[in-house]
C-alpha cells in the first residue's frame, strides 16, 4: 500500500456499524478497496458510550492520546510509520482527531517520537458532520443521539465539552488552526436534518459548526444526507459517495510525494537538533552577566 486511510466513528458509534448503510453495505470494505487498490483501509474503534451502566469514563484527552498511541504502535509494528495517512472522521470522531493531532504536534525526538511520526505522515482529513463549534446540547444530544443511536442517559465526561461555543472547543480550534496548514482538509456538512419525531422540527449539525473558521488549506461541501447518513453509502451509484471518492482519489495521488518531503524536512530538522546538542556553543551563567 502507498497510503493508509483511517476511519473514526463518533459518540456511541461502532467501527463497522457506523459506516454500514441500511442495505448492509460497509462502504469502507465493500466499495472503497476497488476504487483505491493501493490504499490500506482501517477503521478505529474506541469506547465512547455515553449511556447505560457501562458508559465510558474516558475524557476527550484520554481518548485522543490513546488513539495516537495505538495508531503509532500499529504503524511501527507493521513497519509503516512513514506511510502517508488520510483520515475520515465522523461527528465526535473529528473532535477526537483534532485533539490527537494537536497532541502529536507536541511530540519530538526525545518525547514520543512515534507520535510525532503520525503528524509528519498525516496528509489529508475528511470531516463528516463534526460539530467543531459545538451544538445546542438541549436539542442535539437529547434528540439526535436518542433517536438515532440509542435511548441514553448521557455521561457528561465527554458531552459537557460539546455545548455550543464551549471554552474547550474554542481553545481546540485556536490550537488546531495553528497547525491546519499541514493538512489538506475537507469539511462536509449534512444538507438534510434529522427528524426527532413526527411533530418536531428537523435537527442537525449546522454548516457553521461543521466548518472550522480560520483553518488553512480547506474546502467545505454539503452532502445531501442526514447526520448519520454522512458516513453511510449504499452503492457505487450513490452520487454522494462519488463526491467523497473524488476527494480521496486526489489525496491518494498527491500524498506520497508530499509526505516524502515532510520526512526529508523532518530528518534535516533532527540533524540540526543533534548538531546543537553536540555543539552547544557559548554557555552563559546568569550571574556572570552582572
Image (cartoon, rainbow, N blue to C red):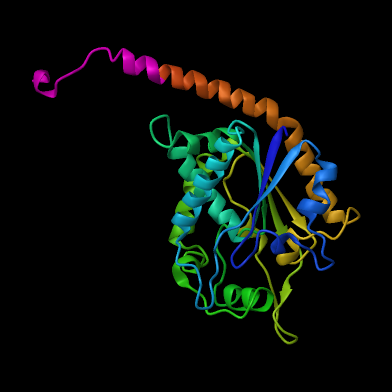
Quadrant of the rendered image containing residue 270 = top left
Residue at horizontal 70 percent and vertical 58 percent from the top:
189
* Residue 130 visible in image: yes
**Foreground pick, 110 / 75:** 75
Residue 71 to residue 9: above or below: above
Residue at horizontal 72 percent and vertical 73 percent from the top:
194
Whole-percent x, y for residue 172 in the image: 48, 52
Q: Which residues are magenta?
A: 273-290
Asked whether, in this view, residue 63 is left or right of residue 11, the answer is left
**Foreground pick, 80 / 119:** 80
Residue 269 to residue 69: above or below: above
Asked whether, in this view, residue 265 is left or right of residue 241, the answer is left
Which quarter shows the C terminus? top left
Asked whether, in this view, residue 67 is left or right of residue 284, the answer is right
Tag count in the figure?
Answer: 0
Residue 9 to residue 242: above or below: below
Which residue ends up furthest to the front in the rendered image? 77
Residue at horizontal 55 percent and vertical 55 percent from the top:
95
Quadrant of the rendered image containing residue 284 = top left
Asked whether, in this view, residue 19 is left or right of residue 12, the answer is right
Which quarter shows the N terminus? top right
Amino acid at each position: 500500500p502507498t497510503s493508509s486511510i483511517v476511519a473514526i466513528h463518533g459518540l456511541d458509534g461502532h467501527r463497522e456499524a457506523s459506516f454500514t448503510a441500511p442495505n448492509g453495505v460497509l462502504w469502507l470494505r465493500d466499495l472503497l478497496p476497488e476504487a483505491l487498490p493501493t490504499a490500506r483501509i482501517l477503521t478505529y474503534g474506541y469506547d465512547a458510550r455515553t449511556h447505560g451502566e457501562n458508559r465510558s469514563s474516558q475524557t476527550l484527552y484520554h481518548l485522543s492520546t490513546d488513539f495516537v498511541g495505538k495508531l503509532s504502535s500499529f504503524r511501527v509494528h507493521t513497519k509503516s510509520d512513514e506511510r502517508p495517512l488520510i483520515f475520515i472522521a465522523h461527528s465526535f470522531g473529528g473532535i477526537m482527531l483534532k485533539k490527537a493531532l494537536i497532541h502529536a504536534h507536541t511530540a519530538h525526538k526525545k518525547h514520543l517520537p512515534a507520535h510525532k511520526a503520525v503528524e509528519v505522515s498525516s496528509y489529508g482529513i475528511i470531516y463528516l458532520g463534526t460539530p467543531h463549534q459545538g451544538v445546542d446540547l438541549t436539542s442535539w444530544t437529547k434528540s439526535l443521539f436518542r433517536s438515532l443511536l440509542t435511548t441514553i442517559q448521557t455521561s457528561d465526561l465527554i458531552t459537557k465539552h460539546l455545548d455550543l461555543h464551549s471554552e474547550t472547543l474554542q481553545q481546540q480550534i485556536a490550537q488546531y488552526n495553528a497547525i491546519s496548514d499541514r493538512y489538506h482538509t475537507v469539511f462536509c456538512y449534512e444538507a438534510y436534518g434529522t427528524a426527532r419525531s413526527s411533530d418536531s422540527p428537523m435537527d442537525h449539525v449546522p454548516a457553521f459548526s461543521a466548518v472550522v473558521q480560520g483553518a488553512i488549506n480547506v474546502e467545505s461541501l454539503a452532502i445531501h444526507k442526514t447526520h448519520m447518513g454522512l458516513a453511510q453509502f449504499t452503492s457505487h451509484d450513490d452520487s454522494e459517495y462519488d463526491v467523497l471518492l473524488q476527494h480521496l482519489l486526489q489525496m491518494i495521488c498527491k500524498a506520497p510525494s508530499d509526505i516524502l518531503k515532510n520526512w526529508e524536512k523532518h530528518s534535516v530538522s533532527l540533524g540540526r537538533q543533534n548538531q546543537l546538542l553536540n555543539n552547544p556553543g557559548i554557555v552563559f551563567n546568569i550571574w556572570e552577566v552582572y
